[in-house]
């Protein structure tokens, strides 16, 4: 286990985790809004926002899938030491981490069942940048419309048609997150 895996937890875990959890909730409750989230330090290329989400939302009971450049020995060691989440393939994941391209096709992730729609995967999509422009969003938590820079349109449009089944998404960049729940409708702007 490398030295990098031993560092990177929250400095003040109760307060930092509470702030990160609040940001995570706000991001999904208000799609299209950007929220600051910081404190987690994982090996590259994991952003501070993604590390903070993992520290807050994952534990030994939440199987995690790492995709592409995010699936390294250093990141696996960090997760084992800091979180304890089991690393699994896409079909068993409750959470998945990677870039948009690495997470393709998103259809390999569970979308829940009619009896248990909550048994789906939440994807943490690492982005170069996040901005409140691009695709037009409507749905719960959005007064009229909102905009968010998304890596594609069609997969999110198809995902919304599956509601109440489907995937939920967090987009991370640096110390910012945005959320896109399965109930949000996405259109070209």
Image (cartoon, helix red, strand yellow):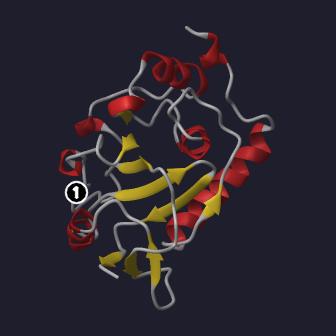
Q: Is residue 95 at least partly visible in the picture?
A: no
Residue at 79%, 34% in the rendered image: 11
Q: Nearer the viewer, residue 40 or 26?
A: 40
Q: Where is residue 165 drawn, in percent x and y?
A: 26, 64
Name the residue: 37% across, 44% down: 99
- Secondary structure of the residue carrying numbered label 1: loop
Residue visible at 29% across and 45% down in the picture: 101
Of the pair 62 and 31, the residue shown nearer to us: 31
Please indicate, yes or no, whether residue 178 appears anywhere in the rendered image.
Answer: yes
Quadrant where the C terminus is found in the figure: bottom left
Q: Residue furthest bottom?
A: 144
Q: Residue at x 56, y 71 (%)?
A: 33
The spot of residue 36 in percent (x, y) is 67, 57
- Picture coordinates of residue 151 (x, y %)? 34, 59
Task: Give the left or right position of residue 49, taking residue 70 as reference.
Answer: right
Q: Which residue is mark 1?
A: 113
Residue 111: image x %, image y %? 25, 55
Q: Residues within 10 Å of mark 1 (few under 14, many from 20)?
A: few
Q: Give the answer, above or below, for where 92 lies relative to 118.
A: above
Locate residue 162: give its quadrant.
bottom left
The relative height of residue 38 versus residue 66 in the rendered view (above or below) is below
Question: How many numbered discs, if any?
Answer: 1
80 in relation to 12, above or below: above
Quarter placement of the N terminus: top right
């Amino acid at each position: 286990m490398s030295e990098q895996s031993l560092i990177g937890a929250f400095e003040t875990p109760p307060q930092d985790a509470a702030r990160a959890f609040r940001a995570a909730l706000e991001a999904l409750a208000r799609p299209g809004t950007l929220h600051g989230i910081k404190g987690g330090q994982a090996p590259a290329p994991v952003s501070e926002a993604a590390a903070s989400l993992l520290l807050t939302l994952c534990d030994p009971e939440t199987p995690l899938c790492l995709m592409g450049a995010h699936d390294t020995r250093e990141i696996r060691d960090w997760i084992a030491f800091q979180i304890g989440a089991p690393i699994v393939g896409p079909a068993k994941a409750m959470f998945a981490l990677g870039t948009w391209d690495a997470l393709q096709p998103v259809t390999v992730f569970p979308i829940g069942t009619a009896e248990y729609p909550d048994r789906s995967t939440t994807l943490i999509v690492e982005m170069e940048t996040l901005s409140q422009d691009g695709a037009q969003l409507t749905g719960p938590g959005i007064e009229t419309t909102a905009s968010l820079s998304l890596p594609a349109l069609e997969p999110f449009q198809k995902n919304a048609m599956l509601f109440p089944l489907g995937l939920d998404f967090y987009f991370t960049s640096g110390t910012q997150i945005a959320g896109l729940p399965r109930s949000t409708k996405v259109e070209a702007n």
